[in-house]
Image (spheres, rainbow, N blue to C red):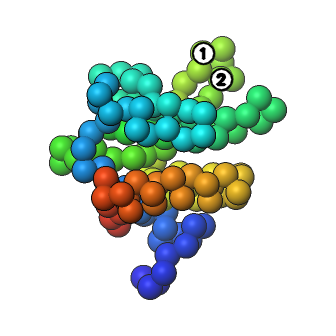
Amino acid sequence: MKDQLQLGDDEFGKMMLVLKQPVTQANHKEFKFLDGEMQEIAPDIWAMPAYMQDDDDFTLFFLTTQIESGETVVAFSTGDASHGDFRLSEPMVTGAGLNLLNDQQPDRAKRVLKFLNDISRADEGNWRMVD
């Protein structure tokens, strides 16, 4: 593994941001990105746009949810409105979602990464490598 992982690296695609506390009604407003705000889309599953433009079919959403270990993670899902109903894809690990966004919109990917790194620097989450 490389000493310094970078956005776009295959290894970076295996990175997951694990939050120290779950997103709740009490704290969800602390997780704002640009004009977006976390919304609870199902019990204990929160979503917010990371990239969504009227003139682009590609969309990417932050998802926070609890995994089997009981930890709360930041994942990503793409959005699909092609069949009339808006649906989110299966979640992908944080790094994979960032790499996908980097392929489509590199400048936005850098802003999203900065947002997630700010969460980590504020000691509200930690980056981990997953299999």
Judging depth in this view, the residue of 75 and 34 nearest the camera is 34
Measuring 47% from the left and 71% from the top, which residue is drawn there?
Answer: 11
Residue linked to disc 1: 85
Residue type, mark 2 in image: Ala
Q: x%, y% of residue 62?
A: 49, 40
**Where does the N terminus fall, quadrant-wise?**
bottom left
Residue linked to disc 2: 81
Measuring 48% from the left and 81% from the top, which residue is drawn there?
Answer: 4
Q: Is residue 42 left or right of residue 112?
A: left
Q: CA distance from mark 2 to mark 1?
A: 6 Å
**In the figure, residue 109 lies in which quadrant?**
bottom right
Please, is residue 22 above or below residue 103 in the view?
above
Measuring 42% from the left and 32% from the top, which residue is drawn there?
Answer: 29
**Where does the C terminus fall, quadrant-wise?**
bottom left
Judging depth in this view, the residue of 128 and 122 nearest the camera is 122
Please, is residue 96 above or below residue 59 in the view?
below
Q: Are marks 2 and 1 in contact (CB under 8 Å)?
A: yes
Q: Is residue 54 left or right of residue 70?
A: right
